Image (cartoon, helix red, strand yellow):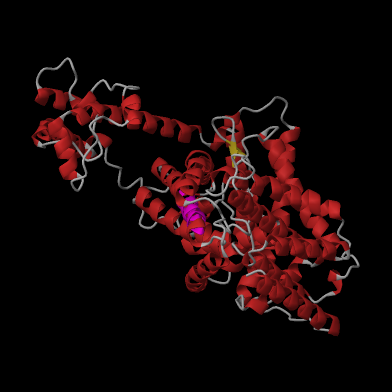
């Protein structure tokens, strides 16, 4: 979430490799997790996308911490019945969101004007606003992680059509997802090969040059690959028009789940205003 | 820079989505019109490239690291409208699947970075690059400046979005419901990091990759270059010739600096601690401040801090020069000279950095 890491350990190659590895691992885990047998995995992707988006909007709308906490508990319960272990949620979402939002919320405890809390230099209003920030970020991130780990990514993108997202945008998003994995792999291999040829520790200036030349080489590979993909698309009959198969079918349990999501969202918004 | 869920109110997010939709529609139309179906895989792959570049922890001077977004680079290579779509797609994928940026804030993040960022980057690049040849160092500098200005403009927009939240949304007890920091805190907090760290990362990636492309495939820079002066047919004017009128103008301005003495009083808000003890000056302050009387003594903080540093040319009147006019002239020449030397050093540093380029990696 942050744009810079003043305390990043290790060299540029190690840090970048770690980041690329983490992203690849997350993508692969999501794919494996989405194919497990669980309650959410059995639902229509459109219901899940609409339901989880509604819950995230609800979290943003309600102004009672207890309701946001309730939605977080619900998200955790849904994760558990969908074969996503709590430790995965803790490691991949809660810790990062807490550290990031916590660091941003901390000064607000002291800077927000209001009533002093037990004579301390922090205010009641500061604690409340900081709690809102952290709780909303944690809950929304958990909801999105549960959605991403219980639904194949291509299905999530296809489901965006229910929000009238143009077909061409959905197709570009789908292709992007596929090529992100390929580019992550390519970048990973590039940096690994460089690491295997590096004996001494590189200076920051050398690292900068390596990053820039790697970005340049990736750009070349991108354009080369773009031509190849386009030729392959033409070979398969692509003439500029894009179509996607809407092969989802609503069943009774999907309607029930949709009703449940709608009810929770409506009741929370009514209670939390 | 990637705004998470919960930092912006739903109303702000809705406005940001509404502001982004027309740009996306125009971008899709323009991309369809100006390019062909080849654009579909190109956009996807550029979005993927932008995603991967965002993962590079670029080492920066001072021992810290920063992420570039690739806005400047994408704009220079595929143009602002296609870059707008490619970076938007990368941001949507990050928000949906990697938890980087919130789903409710996708509109705001796309507006700040993909839309405003690419349009600003394009304007700055075209303005700074002019009609210079594709292989010129000026294009490298232009790309770097475009990336730097674009990311800082995006950060400023995000800071404004953060900063208006406590003004608009508070609960009954006065606690802000979303981002708690007002503009006076949000803007410096965001801008310090971006002006110094994230901006440098963007500058390095944009300028560095353009320098790399100048050596490896110049044609990639042609798409957004506009009318380009042919480097071989029309030799660039020598700096001494093209800059001669500017040097002459600068010399005339320096000579005219003693005219500043004719202006009565001092500029509003630039009073010295000793001015408060002077009745005539206090009268001037009052008449320039809607008749609000100035205090008889300088405020304590102002009096304390004003003695911390004594400028060698205080009030443009060096103590060792008797004539006020000559003192003004000398101050003008010294100030202008310092600025010129500073820029010459910066230019020499930039040229050597460009020459070092990515080849030495």
Any part of residue B251 in sight = yes
Compare residues B229 and B115 and report the one nearer the observer: B115
Residue closest to the far top: B320
Compare residues B304 and B328 and report the one nearer the observer: B304
- State how many labels appear: 0
Which quadrant, please, contains the C terminus of chain B? top right
Side (left or right) of A41 relative to B25: right
Residue A197: percent from left, percent from top: 73, 32
Q: Residue at x 56, y 54 (%)?
A: B179
Side (left or right) of B68 relative to B157: right
Residue closest to the far front: A118
Compare residues B98 and B352 and report the one nearer the observer: B98
Residue B79 belongs to the span the image colors magenta: no
Q: Quadrant of residue A84?
A: bottom right
Q: Quadrant of residue B348?
A: top left
Q: Residue at x 85, y 85 (%)?
A: A252
Residue B161 belongs to the span the image colors magenta: yes
Question: From what the image shows, is residue A246 above or below residue B256?
Answer: below
Residue B349: percent from left, percent from top: 42, 30
Any part of residue A217 in sight = no
Residue A160: percent from left, percent from top: 67, 73
Q: Main secondary structure of the magenta part?
A: helix
Q: Residue at x 61, y 75 (%)?
A: A165
Q: Which residues are magenta?
A: B150-165
Residue B155: percent from left, percent from top: 49, 51
């Amino acid at each position: 979430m942050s744009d810079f890491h003043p305390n990043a350990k290790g060299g540029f190659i190690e840090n970048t490799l770690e980041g690329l590895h983490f992203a690849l691992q997350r993508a692969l885990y999501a794919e494996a997790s989405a194919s497990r047998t669980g309650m959410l995995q059995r639902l229509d992707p459109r219901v899940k996308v609409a339901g989880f988006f509604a819950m995230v909007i609800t979290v943003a709308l309600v102004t009672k911490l207890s309701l946001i906490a309730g939605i977080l508990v619900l998200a955790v319960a849904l994760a558990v019945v969908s074969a996503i272990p709590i430790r995965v949620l803790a490691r991949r979402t809660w810790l990062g969101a807490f550290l990031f939002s916590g660091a941003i919320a901390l000064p607000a405890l002291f800077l927000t004007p209001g009533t002093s809390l037990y004579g301390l230099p922090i205010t009641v209003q500061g604690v409340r606003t900081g709690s809102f920030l952290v709780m909303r970020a944690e809950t929304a991130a958990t909801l999105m992680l549960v959605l991403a780990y219980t639904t194949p990514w291509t299905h999530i993108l296809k489901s965006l059509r229910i929000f009238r997202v143009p077909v061409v945008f959905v197709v570009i998003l789908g292709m992007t997802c596929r090529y992100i994995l390929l580019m992550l792999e390519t970048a990973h291999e590039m940096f690994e090969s460089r690491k295997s040829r590096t004996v001494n520790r590189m200076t920051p200036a050398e690292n900068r040059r390596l990053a820039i030349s790697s970005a340049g080489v990736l750009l070349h590979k991108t354009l080369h690959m773009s031509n190849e993909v386009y030729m392959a698309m033409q070979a398969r009959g692509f003439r500029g028009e894009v179509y996607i198969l809407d092969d989802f079918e609503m069943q009774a349990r999907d309607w029930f789940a949709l009703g449940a999501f709608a009810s929770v969202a409506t009741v929370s918004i009514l209670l939390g205003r | 820079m990637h705004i998470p869920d919960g930092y912006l109110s739903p109303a702000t997010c809705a406005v940001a989505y509404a502001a982004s939709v027309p740009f996306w529609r125009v971008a899709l139309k323009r991309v369809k019109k100006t390019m062909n179906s080849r654009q579909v895989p190109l956009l996807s792959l550029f979005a993927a490239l932008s995603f991967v570049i965002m993962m590079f922890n670029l080492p920066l001077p001072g021992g810290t690291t920063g992420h570039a977004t690739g806005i400047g680079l994408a704009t220079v290579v595929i143009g602002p409208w296609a870059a707008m779509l490619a970076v938007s797609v990368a941001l949507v994928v990050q928000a949906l699947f990697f938890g980087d940026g919130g789903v409710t804030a996708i509109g705001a993040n796309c507006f700040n970075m993909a839309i405003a960022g690419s349009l600003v980057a394009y304007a700055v690049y075209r303005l700074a690059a002019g009609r210079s040849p594709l292989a010129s160092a000026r294009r490298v500098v232009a790309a770097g400046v475009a990336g730097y200005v674009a990311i800082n403009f995006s950060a400023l927009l995000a800071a404004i979005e953060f900063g208006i939240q406590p003004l608009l949304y508070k609960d009954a007890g006065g606690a802000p419901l979303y981002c708690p920091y007002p503009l006076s805190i949000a803007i410096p907090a965001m801008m310090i990091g971006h002006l110094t760290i994230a901006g440098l990362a963007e500058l390095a990636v944009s300028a560095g990759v353009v320098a790399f492309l100048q050596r490896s495939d110049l044609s990639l820079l042609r798409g957004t270059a506009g009318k380009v002066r042919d480097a071989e047919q029309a030799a660039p004017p020598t700096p001494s010739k093209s800059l001669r009128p500017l040097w002459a103008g600068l010399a005339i301005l320096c000579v005219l600096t003693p005219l500043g003495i004719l202006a009565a009083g001092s500029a509003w808000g630039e009073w010295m601690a000793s001015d408060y003890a002077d009745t005539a000056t206090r009268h001037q302050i009052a008449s320039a401040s809607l008749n609000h009387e100035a205090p008889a003594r300088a405020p304590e903080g102002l009096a304390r801090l004003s003695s911390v540093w004594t400028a060698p040319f205080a009030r443009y009147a060096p103590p060792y020069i008797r004539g006020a006019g000559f003192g003004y002239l000398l101050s003008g020449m010294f100030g202008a000279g310092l600025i010129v030397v500073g820029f010459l050093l910066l230019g020499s540093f930039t040229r050597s950095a460009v020459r070092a380029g990515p080849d030495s990696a």
